[in-house]
Amino acid sequence: MTEPEKPHAHPAQLAMDLDRSVSVLINFVATKLTASGSAAYRARFGLNITEFRVLAMLAVEPDILGRRFTEVMGLDPGAASRTLKGLEARGLVVSRIDDRHPAYRRWSLTAAGAALQDEAVPIALERARILLQDFDADEEARLVDFLRRMLKRMPDVSALNGDAGEAG
């Protein structure tokens, strides 16, 4: 009986420079921001990061269709629906049937949701201040411009997957 071959490490033919890859670095920052944000908002406000982002978006755009969270935040429709229904069950958001399309719902903050969002925003602003403290105002403005331009390209990036949705 022959002994099975032991696995060997095989070097990759191509390796990304993790210190210079824009998509990798953005992903690292986003992953760490999400994890630390989830911990911060859960401990202080009983919210996960997605719930906080939904509340924050509703503060900016009240009375919006659920699909708007997919468009702006990149949430898949199932995650958006689960998050909104969970927030509604907790009395933080309210929905109503859309006048023009009865199959769709429009979402807004309740008074309790607005108050909770207002409590959480200073934490978000402080997190952003700390993150950007090594940037001057011009660099911060350029970074925001760069990120907005990158967001506009996401449909092109997603097209590599053969779909029209947004992927990371």
Image: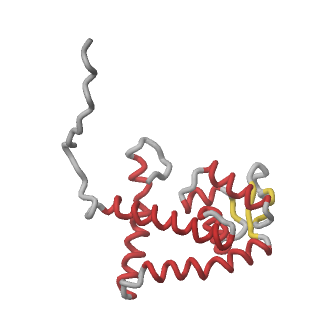
> Which residue extends farthest top?
1
Q: Position of residue 41 (x, y in %)?
A: 62, 70
Q: Residue at x 48, y 83 (%)?
A: 129
With respect to residue 101, does 13 lie above or below? Answer: above
Q: Nearer the viewer, residue 148 or 22?
A: 22
Q: Quadrant of the C terminus?
A: bottom left
Q: Residue at x 56, y 58 (%)?
A: 71
Which of the 4 quarters of the picture holds residue 29? bottom left
With respect to residue 154, does 52 lie above or below? Answer: below
Q: On the rendered structure, is 4 left or right of 32?
A: left
Q: Position of residue 66 (x, y in %)?
A: 67, 57
Which of the 4 quarters of the picture holds residue 138? bottom left
Q: On the rendered structure, is 13 left or right of 22?
A: left
Which of the 4 quarters of the picture holds residue 116? bottom right
Q: On the rendered structure, is 165 left or right of 78?
A: left
Q: Residue at x 74, y 78 (%)?
A: 115
Q: Position of residue 20 (x, y in %)?
A: 26, 64
Q: Position of residue 15 (x, y in %)?
A: 23, 50
Q: Nearer the viewer, residue 42 or 101?
A: 42
